[in-house]
Amino acid sequence: MGILDRMSTILRANINSALDKAEDPEKMLDQIIRDMAGAIEEAKGQVAGVIAQEKLLEAEKNNATRSSREWSDRAEKAVKAGRDDLAREALRRKKDFEGIAATYQQQYDTQHEMTSKIRSQLELLMRKYDDAVRNRDVMIARHRSAVAAQQVSKQLAAMSGMDRTSDISRMDQRLRQEEAKALAMVELNSGGTASVEDQFAQLESGDSMDDELKMLKSKMGMGGQQ
């Protein structure tokens, strides 16, 4: 039966594995749930048909068994009546119905085994369906967390393989050059402002002139004046 193959395929399906391979896990899970629901409805209809056929075979078997017993009773009546010819005919028909009953019994046993199998698979599929519906959000959340963890792990692995020492060294050198350039610009923009060395030279020159002035005043007899 096609439905048995379809149900077996769905039951063997590893939902977590399917989600890992899917481009859109949420759509994949929803599709799996829809497939399960469709298989369940289809299976219910076929199970009903299988059960109906089983009951029909059981009824035919019971009818044949009952007919066999009736012809057995007739054979006994014919013997009591001294009608051996009728007794032989009744025994022949009794045997025919026994054979028919045995055939129906075999068919019933086969049908019953199939019914039990498909019922068992249907019950298992319904439980799996209920679990999938109940755990849908949890499974999606777990899958998203797993994907996020994998991405973080890849990023960390990529960063660990990068050496930024040379980049930092180049940045430090560049900053030093910029600072030196800024100082040079300040000195250039200061215009006529004397350097420290020039200021000290002027100071020393001023002291020499003071000494010369004192000597001149002393010659002129003006040593007390400032």
Image (spheres, rainbow, N blue to C red):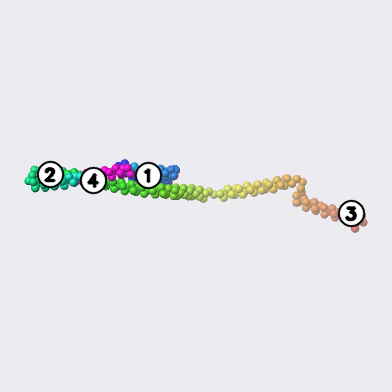
Residue 187 vs residue 74, the one in the foreground: 74
Measured as percent of width and height from the top left, residue 50 is found at 28, 44
**Position of residue 82 in the picture relative to residue 103 (left or right):** left
Front: mark 4 or 1: 4
Residue at numbered disc 1:
36
Q: Mark 4 points at which residue?
A: 58
Residue 89 on image: x %, y %? 11, 43
Q: Does the magenta stretch include residue 185?
A: no
From where the camera sits, is residue 99 visible? no
Depicted 114 relative to depicted 221: above or below = above
Looking at this rendering, what residue extends furthest in the bottom direction?
224
Choose the circle earlier in sequence order: 4 or 1. Answer: 1
Q: Say whether marks 4 and 1 touch (CB < 8 Å).
A: no
Which residue is located at x 48 percent, y 48 percent? 148
- Name the dominant secondary structure of the magenta segment: helix
Mark drawn on residue 90 = 2
Q: In which quarter of the image is the N terminus?
A: top left
- In the rendered structure, which disc, 2 or 3, sits on the residue that comes first in sequence? 2
- Labels 1, 2: front one: 2
Residue at 30% from the left image edge and 46% from the top image edge:
118
Local packing at callout 1 (Cα closer than 10 Å; few below 14, some 14-19, many 20+) is many
Which three-letter amino acid code belongs to the residue tagged 1?
Met
Mark 1–mark 2 distance (CA, rounded to whole Å): 55 Å
